[in-house]
Amino acid sequence: MNASLLAISVALAAQSQPPIDEDQRASAETIVVAAPRIIALEKVATAEDEPATSPDGAAFIAQQPGAALVDNGALSGQVQMRGLFGERIALRINGQHFATGGPNAMDPAMHYAPMVLIDRVEIARGISPVRDGPGLGGGINTVLKQVGFSAGETLALQADLSGQYRSVDDGIALGGIAGLASERWRIGLIASEERGSDTRFPGGRVATTGYQRAVYGAHAGFRTDSGELSIEYRRQQTGRSGNPPFAMDIIYFNTDFARLAFEGNLSDRVRLEAHASYAGVSHRMNNFEQRPAPATAMTRQSDTYADTMGTGMALRFGSAMRHVRLGADVELIDKGYMLYNPLAAAFFIHPLDHAKSDRLGAFVEWRSGVGPIELELGARIDRHRAQTGAPRFGPGVPAGPADLARAFAGADRSWSGTTVDASARLWAELGAITPRLTLARKTRAPSLIERFSWLPTEASGGLADGNIYVGSPALKPESAWIAEAGFDWSGASAHVRPVLYYRRIDDFIQGVPFDATPGLVDTRVEMVAQANGDATPLRFANTDAEIWGADVAFGTRITGPLRIDGVASYVRGTRRDIADDLYRMAPANGRLALTWDAGHWSMAMEGQAVAAQRNVSRTNGEAASSGYFLANLYAHWMVRAGLRLDIGIENLFDRCYLEHLSGYNRVQGSDVPLNTRLPGAGRSAFLRLRWAVN
């Protein structure tokens, strides 16, 4: 691991497309993490690399300070940042935000970012800027590879292709981009193909963890002296992929992305930023094709969809260092799903039927400075509306769920409300040290699942805790008061960046017992939940919580090409209304790497230590976990300019360990016992080759 990438670095991606936002360049607040670079031989010593072999891009981000992986499957991992994950983080791919298609978030945002296609990840660890929309925590924008503009007037070939094999699941990944570019035009194709079998661990195989995924698309851009117009389209087809923490597995995700954007100067002091985008997800999952089939009466399949349309525009008055930005954005979401028994045509039901979520927002940002102090102030207001149709169901649906459907049809199935966000970021560049302070109020509106899930099911937006949930139409938006303080220090041969943070969250949405008598089955909801295997369902409700912690990135050169780098993270989350801990909080952890960087080749030995986690949620029935230590070896060799070979061994000593944030096994016949936490991957050797023409 090269932890120097954890410092702010713009130069490492200066030739990538789309370009890094000028405000990131100016404020030096966003961490930019690049995939292994292809550069000239004489510049290898400055390459910023982060080894990552998992097909899930979330595992790549999880190696950063304050981040962790919520492992829900090979292609379904979620990023946790300082204790928050899922829709509480502002997640985007190529600047595009969209709704996931699965009611249990089997396709979180990073599902759509194969590692072989990632160029860089822009991470706002603390808070995301108000221009990026509402969101309770930080922000992540994953930028996929694209053909960039060249320096000449004639079209020239560009290509960036990668191939990888890893032994732990016999996983193969191939992908990259190719196209033509000049100083005015660029046009390119993007594609990838990935396949893997069940993951091995020291006790055998984790059943139903194989995966398959393909991506293909095209992008183009036209640049004038004043700005750039860009367009892109991608199609992703995820095939049969296992999800042992869930009651069903992925049969397919067929997803289309389209985005049109313009950035340019209207005058010397006015810059226009505009975009329009669409994402459409079609998804099927079931409980019988990839795992042992249940009895005929319990055979289940679900078809879901999610369509997201978004547009936004902003005007920036001034320069990158001193400006006012005014903007507005709109997001329209339509999603729903049907649960049915394919062996019994009369049994079908729509737990979420044409549910819609609309948001209209406006924001203002001011970037200025007073003496050595730089500041960025922002505020935004969003008007939200949500509604859903009356549920449909077939004649084969039992009386309990049918009665709940009729009751929900006669209830108020709409909500509207307003949220207000504000932020203040201050920093001062005082030579080798840059102190930082952030104060903010951030919000998140409830998801459609949290608000309108009237049927007791395990649909929870990705919690994967085995509990049955129902929604609450009257949920209030979450609001967090945030304070962060830290500093950057960089010397001639060392650097360190520690941060302390605190979040006080009002109306935090959490599962709570359905009524005041849990275990006493005296309501229709509890009766239906009991028939589905859980007599103590949870109800999404507003509670109060707080999250605090610290993280740090550091490194120093020992002598010559030998250096040591590391990261460490600690987070704690508790309920404020009752004595309980928040669910799925990452245990304290750290990484330390000793690297010999000899110019055109390097070798690194990395140790990863994870502490035991005893602060667990009783409400969610969360089990404690033990600590562990892993060792990894990595090396790379620049064979020649434009051709790079990476090799390594992860979990060198084949340690059997349980990641605290992993889900629990729901698949019979696996080498992992039922309802126990899924183990981490065993020893895995990998080889990756990357070739680029630029």
Image (spheres, grey):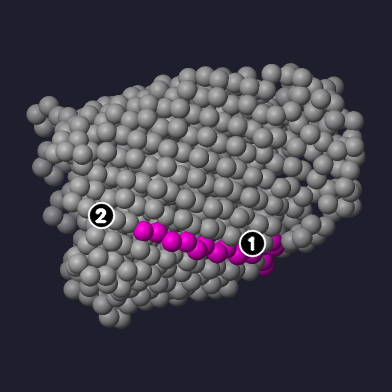
Residue 580 seen in render: no
Q: Which residue in the rendered view is the most extreme toward the bottom?
A: 639
Is 557 located above or below residue 522 in the figure? below
| Identity of the residue drawn at 59% across and 26% down | 386
Range drawn in magenta: 203-220
Q: Nearer the viewer, residue 416 or 14?
A: 416
Label 1 sits on residue = 239
Name the side, left or right, on which 168 lies relative to 688: right
Task: Give the x, y percent position of residue 487.
Answer: 23, 38
Is 200 located above or below residue 548 in the figure? below
The answer to whether the residues at label 2 and label 1 have Cβ atoms under 8 Å apart is no
Mark toward the viewer: 2 or 1: 2
The kind of residue on which mark 2 rests is: Arg
Q: Examine the residues drawn in magenta and state their main secondary structure.
A: strand
Q: Which numbered disc flags the more N-terminal residue, 2 or 1?
A: 2
Q: Is residue 529 magenta?
A: no
Label 2 sits on residue = 223
Residue 38 location, quadrant: bottom left
Q: How many numbered badges does the structure rendering display?
A: 2
| Identity of the residue drawn at 56% across and 31% down | 357
Instruction: Using a 10 Å C-alpha cutoff, classify the residue at mark 1 as few (fewer than 14 neighbours), some (14 to 19) or many (20 or more).
Output: some
Separation (CA) of disc 2 from disc 1: 37 Å
Name the side, left or right, on which 685 lies relative to 18: right
Q: Is residue 216 magenta?
A: yes
| Identity of the residue drawn at 87% across and 52% down | 343
Task: Give the x, y percent position of residue 149.
Answer: 26, 61
Residue 394 seen in render: yes
The kind of residue on which mark 1 rests is: Gly
Task: Give the x, y percent position of residue 235.
Answer: 53, 58
Q: If the image is split into quadrants, where does the N terminus sit?
A: bottom left
